Image (cartoon, rainbow, N blue to C red):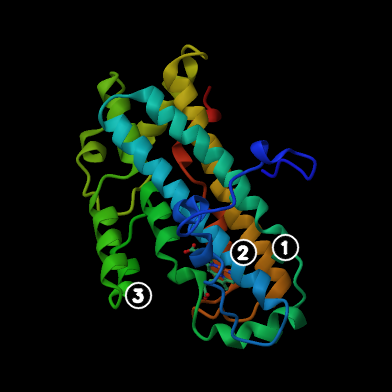
Amino acid sequence: MSAGGAAPDSEAPHLDFAGTTPYEDYVQADVLTHLQHPRSDEPGEMVFLVTTQVMELWFTVIVHEWETAAAALRRGELPVAMAALKRSAWELESLNASWKPIAHLTPAQFNAYRSALGEGSGFQSAMYRRMEFLLGDKSASMLVPHRGAPRVHAELEKALAEPSLYDEVLRLLARRGYAIPAEVLEREPTARYEAHPDVEEAWARVYAGDQDGELVRLGEALTEVGELVWRWRNDHLVATRRAMGSKVGTGGSAGVAWLEKRARKNVFPELWGARSRV
Ligand code: HEM
């Protein structure tokens, strides 16, 4: 931060660098702030584009946190996993706050640059898909749109084949003596996770126990994450309703009707189900 006009020179920040500034070398702000290429003359398109890019950056951080948490759980390092999950909850709050600048578009405002998006849709966001994979919502067909982008495709393929964050949580519960069925523990990792009544029962037992215990705190951190992801989906749904009513999406889906179906689903449904049984 600047020291202000009155500061003697000896206290002023350095101004003279042989090459680019150390700030630039670390942050790459020059690269980052020249990645905005609106496709229409509509002044409102810039905020739509930047909001989308900001969300992509948050998706990237959140994926990093959940991968950190999954790896820590695999090693049995619960405090490391908890710290990453808690950071991710704050990041999800920031992600969700990013809706504000585009949450109140009128259909006419959105229409002014909608055609510039062509067939582009957030549905094709690979980083969002990695978030969904980590939550357990795996789907091999979601790799298809990325066939033409080798790096993205390889990253998604790896994420599809790896156990999800939730798989690692259930393995930990099993190691701690909770009755997680073998068919859940040995499930095919590339398949979508389906809620299981015995897993809900295991969570109900966790929640009936020590309220300050590690596993209740883990359950609560996951519930927080689940709630905030659900909020992102619902904020997206409402912003979409405002901007385009029930028109077909640029990605070719039924638009709002399709998003409504997605938004109705709970993230980590067994954790929510268990709450009615405590
Ligand atoms: C008001 C602006 C927006 C509208 C009207 C809108 C509309 C839609 C629609 C209709 C879909 C369904 C797929 C399709 O047919 O395109 C969709 C999916 C999606 N959008 Fe948006 N969107 C908006 C803003 C954003 C932003 C800023 C992001 C941030 C990256 C985003 C990310 C996504 C994602 C990740 C999906 C896939 C969701 C899933 O697979 O469950 N959208 N959007």
- The span from disc 3 to disc 1 (Cα, nearest Å) is 29 Å
Q: Position of residue 13 (x, y in %)?
A: 62, 43
Q: Position of residue 158 (x, y in %)?
A: 24, 56
Ligand 1 image-quadrant field: bottom right
Count neighbours of disc 3 (C-alpha within 10 A) and say few if under 14, some if 14 to 19, many if 20 or more: few
Count neighbours of disc 2 (C-alpha within 10 A) and say few if under 14, some if 14 to 19, many if 20 or more: some
In the orientation shown, which residue stands out farthest toward the front?
9
Q: Dividing the image into 4 quarters, which one contains the N terminus?
A: top right
Q: Position of residue 157 (x, y in %)?
A: 25, 60
- Mark 2 and ligand 1: say if the CB distance to the nearest ligand atom is below 8 Å: yes
Looking at marks 3 and 1 on the same chain, the residue that comes earlier in the sequence is marked by 1
- The span from disc 3 to disc 2 (Cα, nearest Å) is 22 Å
Where is mark 1, residue-wise?
101
Figure check: 43 above or below 134: below
Q: Secondary structure at mark 2?
A: helix
User: Observer-nearest residue: 66 or 203?
Assistant: 66
User: Observer-nearest residue: 18 or 205?
Assistant: 18
Q: Amino acid at mark 3?
A: Pro
Q: Residue at x 55, y 82 (%)?
A: 117
Q: Secondary structure at mark 1?
A: helix
- Pointer 1 with pointer 2, Cβ within 8 A: yes
Q: Secondary structure at mark 3?
A: helix
Looking at marks 1 and 2 on the same chain, the residue that comes earlier in the sequence is marked by 2
